[in-house]
Image (cartoon, rainbow, N blue to C red):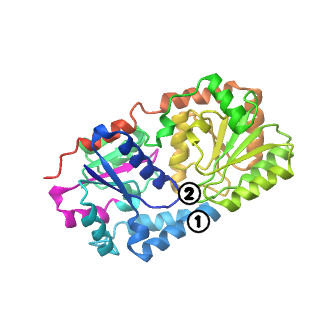
């Protein structure tokens, strides 16, 4: 089966999903799936490419502005062109790959692009599937995600599937698949001895002390230094691991801050770090409530501290709603909240332990292999 994955580099979550699908398909040959990714928004037409850059600029600079952007796209979704802009470029990809299944992991690729796939390849010769990683319905869940004419909608949690039902997806086309994360998130959990050795040898930290992980978006959106300053000023003794996405500038700034403030132990790790092993080893993670990092934290049972600085984007709000519903995260309105929560969790280790237990309970039993099996079971192209 030839699988073409449609993604877009808005933030980092969608590309992470596409990469995870490709990794799992290659590593699990029993499903007979050959996967390839394509970025139709970036590679088909300059207007789409500009919209991607605008999204990423808003995410980096002023998340609250995304409410206007999101609502504009929701209204615009009722007006659909008969074919996508730059259709000839997209057609060339389809004719080269000749996919049996086209899988969208992005909310903007489930309607006009699916329609064009069927025009080019023939309605009976290709199947169109959506993998939606949003964690809750309501404001912030884009109507773009759900195309009732698609062959399959894969949701990560029951709340995702319920949102698809409300937007008109037929019950027999909905599949609760669980989290599609990169393979190292599903590695066996380390033993206490293995965890201690990893922390001592690779992180060069004390495994008996609190370890905080600061996450950034794939594009490097972060406010690590403000959080580090709050920990230093409140004299909260902790060890900090920082990831800065693909931004070398951010990584250098955080590393320089650590050297200038040796009272707080700070270690900056590269973008290609095994985040699965890291999340299973640290005490808590600070991150924006994107669907990608939130699901990774849940799979890893890593207590989540949600970075709300600068406000939340609509699609982040629904993830916060899910976390609050299940009691699996604390929200941070600013850097001072981090210092307060870390001090509290250090003094009361039963609090983060409770979060881990609730994460284990809410994590779906299904996962990547179940998702690949469901895709492989689709009716073969005639």
Q: Residue at x 37, y 45 (%)?
A: 26
Q: Residue at x 50, y 54 (%)?
A: 315
Front residue of 164/356: it is 356
Nearer the observer: mark 2 or 1; the answer is: 1
Q: Tell me: 109 left or right of 379.
A: right
- In the rendered image, which quarter is residue 196 located in? top right
Q: Tell me: 316 left or right of 77.
A: right
Number of marks in the rendered image: 2
Q: Find numbered disc 2 in the image and state the secondary structure of the residue it sits on.
A: loop
> Label 1, on which residue?
58
The answer to whether any part of residue 167 appears in the image is no
Q: Quick check: is 174 in the magenta stretch?
A: no
- Percent x, y of residue 344: 76, 32
Q: In the displayed structure, would residue 171 be above or below residue 86? A: above
Q: Residue at x 31, y 47 (%)?
A: 153
Front residue of 52/165: it is 52
User: How far apart are the alpha carbons under marks 2 and 1?
Assistant: 9 Å
Front residue of 129/1: it is 1
Which region of the structure is painted magenta?
110-136
Q: Tell me: 54 left or right of 23.
A: right
- Percent x, y of residue 206: 76, 31
The circle drawn on residue 313 is 2
2 and 1 marks in contact (CB < 8 Å): yes
Q: Find numbered disc 1 in the image and state the secondary structure of the residue it sits on.
A: helix
Q: In the displayed structure, would residue 357 be above or below residue 99? A: above
The answer to which of marks 2 and 1 sits earlier in the sequence is 1
Label 1: how many Cα within 10 Å (few below 14, some 14–19, many 20+): some
Label 2: how many Cα within 10 Å (few below 14, some 14–19, many 20+): many
Q: Residue at x 72, y 50 (%)?
A: 334
- Percent x, y of residue 76: 39, 69
Front residue of 206/103: it is 206
């Amino acid at each position: 089966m030839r699988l073409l994955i449609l993604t877009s580099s808005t933030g980092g979550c969608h590309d992470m999903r596409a990469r995870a699908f490709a990794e799992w398909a290659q590593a699990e040959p029993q499903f007979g799936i050959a996967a390839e990714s394509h970025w139709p928004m970036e590679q088909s037409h300059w207007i789409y490419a500009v919209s991607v850059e605008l999204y990423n600029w808003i995410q980096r600079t002023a998340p609250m502005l995304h409410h206007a952007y999101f609502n504009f796209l929701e209204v615009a979704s009722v007006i659909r062109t008969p074919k996508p802009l730059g259709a000839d470029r997209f057609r060339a990809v389809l004719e080269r790959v000749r996919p049996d299944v086209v899988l969208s992991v992005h909310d903007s690729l489930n309607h006009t692009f699916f329609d064009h796939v069927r025009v080019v390849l023939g309605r009976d010769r290709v199947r169109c599937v959506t993998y939606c990683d949003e964690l809750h319905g309501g404001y912030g869940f884009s109507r773009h995600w759900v195309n009732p004419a698609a062959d399959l909608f894969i949701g990560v949690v029951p709340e995702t599937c319920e949102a698809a039902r409300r937007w008109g997806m037929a019950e027999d086309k909905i599949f609760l698949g669980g989290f599609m994360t990169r393979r190292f998130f599903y590695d066996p959990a380390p033993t206490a001895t293995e965890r201690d050795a990893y922390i001592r040898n690779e992180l060069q930290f004390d495994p008996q002390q609190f370890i905080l992980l600061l996450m950034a978006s794939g594009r490097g959106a972060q406010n690590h230094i403000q959080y580090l300053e709050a920990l230093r000023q409140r004299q909260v003794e902790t060890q900090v691991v920082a990831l800065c996405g693909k931004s070398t500038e951010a990584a250098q700034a955080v590393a320089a801050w650590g050297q200038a403030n040796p009272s707080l132990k700070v270690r900056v790790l590269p973008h290609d770090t095994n985040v699965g092993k890291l999340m299973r080893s640290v005490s808590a993670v600070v991150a924006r409530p994107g669907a990608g990092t939130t699901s990774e934290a849940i799979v890893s049972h890593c207590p989540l501290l949600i970075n709300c600085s600068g406000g939340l984007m609509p699609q982040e709000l629904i993830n916060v709603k899910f976390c609050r519903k299940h009691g699996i995260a604390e929200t941070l309105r600013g850097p001072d909240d981090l210092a307060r929560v870390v001090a509290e969790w250090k003094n009361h280790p039963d609090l983060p332990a409770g979060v881990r237990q609730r994460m284990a309970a809410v994590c779906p039993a299904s996962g990547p292999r179940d998702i690949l099996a469901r895709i492989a079971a689709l009716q073969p192209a005639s």
